[in-house]
Each structure stands twice: as C-alpha cells, then as structure tokens.
Amino acid sequence: MSESKRLFFALALPDEIQQQIIHWRAASFPPDAGRPVVAANLHVTLAFLGELSAQKQAALETLAGRIRQPGFTLTLDDAGQWLRSRVVWLGTRQPPRGLLQLANMLRAQAARSGCWQSPQPFHPHITLLRDASHAVAIPPPGFCWSFPVREFMLYESQFVRGRTRYTPLQRFPLQP
Ligand code: 3AM
C-alpha cells in the first residue's frame, strides 16, 4: 500500500517576483517580527487537501485537469497581518475573477471528494512571516508586483529535518 501525502493546490510565483518580495520583506520587517517563509516556499494557496492516498490524489488530479479556466493577471498590492493565525501576508486588493473561480472550483472538487474545507471565505494571500504573534507595522508593498498566471500546481508539503518543504508534483495549465 502506498503512503499518503499532504497535498495542496497553489499558484507558484515567478522567480523575479519571489526575489523582489524577499528583499522588500527583509527591508520592511525587523528580525523579531516573525519567522520568514523561505523564498522557494512562497505561494498562493488555492485549496488545501490534507493527507491523501495515492488513489484519491489521482482522482483529484483528474478533476483538476478537467478545469478549463482562462489565465489572469495577479497584482500584489496589499499586505496585512492575521494575529489569530499569527501570519503576515501579501495579497491583492481586487482578486481577479479568474482566481476566485479557480479556487472555488478546486475547493468544491476537494469537498465533493471528502477533503475537509475551511468555512472561512477564500482570501488569496502569500504567507510571508509565521509565528508573528505581536502586531507589527505593515508598510505598503514597495511597488506594484503584477504577473501573469498561466498555470496552477499540486504541491506536496513535507516536514523534513525540522524544515517545511513544498514539492511541486503536477502542473495544470490555464487557458490562453
Ligand atoms: O498559504 P498558507 O501558507 O496560508 O497554512 C497552510 C498553508 O497556507 C495551509 O495550507 C498551506 C500549505 O501548507 N494549511 C495547512 N494545514 C491546513 C488545514 N488543516 C491548512 N489549511 C487549511 N486546513
């Protein structure tokens, strides 16, 4: 029997945006503000799936592969902190309709396949700092980060030697 994997669907970031974000973060927050998420782990979660068997993973991959959704442009022009979940995040003031539709579809497919889905409304964001338990001043994003989104990904989340590692397992292209 194959092992289960902890999985989620997410958007990856272009390398140059990833680099700009980590430079802005380093310049904007003191070292004690929270635990920085490593550059390679920055992403926009679309749907968290939890621990899935290989069979269930294959079923959800098939469903995700049937999604016919146009690409969109994502603009990162918002930042904030959720004290309850102790994260500092980067986000978008006006989530593109395509992003909301994509996340809704993936969450609905996941729910129908028996993956528990949070009742919280979808708030697209990139987690920048974890364990940010004290309120920090959030400067506005340095400049406007805008980039085209042409695909989404299935990631595996692993905790290896004390570090969280996200491994892309599968790419799903969006429509041109
Ligand atoms: O995109 P962020 O970093 O906010 O917090 C986890 C991370 O979100 C979230 O899934 C993303 C990839 O790990 N996550 C982890 N466990 C979760 C759960 N049980 C969860 N989201 C919902 N329910």
Image: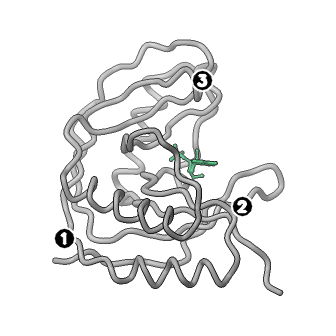
Residue drawn at point x = 36 percent, y = 44 percent = 124
Q: Quadrant of residue 21?
A: top left
> Up-down: is 9 above or below 25?
below
The residue at which mark 1 appears reads as: 70
Residue 64, horizontal then vertical, whole percent: 41, 76
Q: Tell me if 112 is positioned left or right of 156 in this view.
A: left
53 or 139: nearer the viewer: 53
- Secondary structure found at label 1: loop
- Secondary structure found at label 2: strand
Q: Quadrant of residue 129?
A: top right
- Circle 3: residue type: Ala
Do the numbered discs 1 and 3 sit on residues whose CB atoms are within 8 Å? Answer: no
Of badges 2 and 1, the one in the foreground is 1
Rounded to the nearest whole Å, what is the CA distance between mark 2 and mark 1? 30 Å
Q: Quadrant of residue 75?
A: top left
The residue at which mark 3 appears reads as: 132
> Up-down: is 125 above or below 156?
above
55 or 9: nearer the viewer: 55
Residue drawn at point x = 20 percent, y = 77 percent = 175
Q: Which mark is residue 158?
A: 2
- Circle 1: residue type: Pro
Quadrant including the N terminus = bottom right
Residue drawn at point x = 45 percent, y = 38 percent = 120
- Circle 2: residue type: Gln
Q: How is the image coloured?
A: one colour
Mark 1 and mark 3 lie on one chain; the one further toward the N terminus is: 1
Specify whether tag 2 is near ligand 1 (CB below 8 Å): no
Rounded to the nearest whole Å, what is the CA distance between mark 2 and mark 3? 22 Å
106 or 8: nearer the viewer: 106
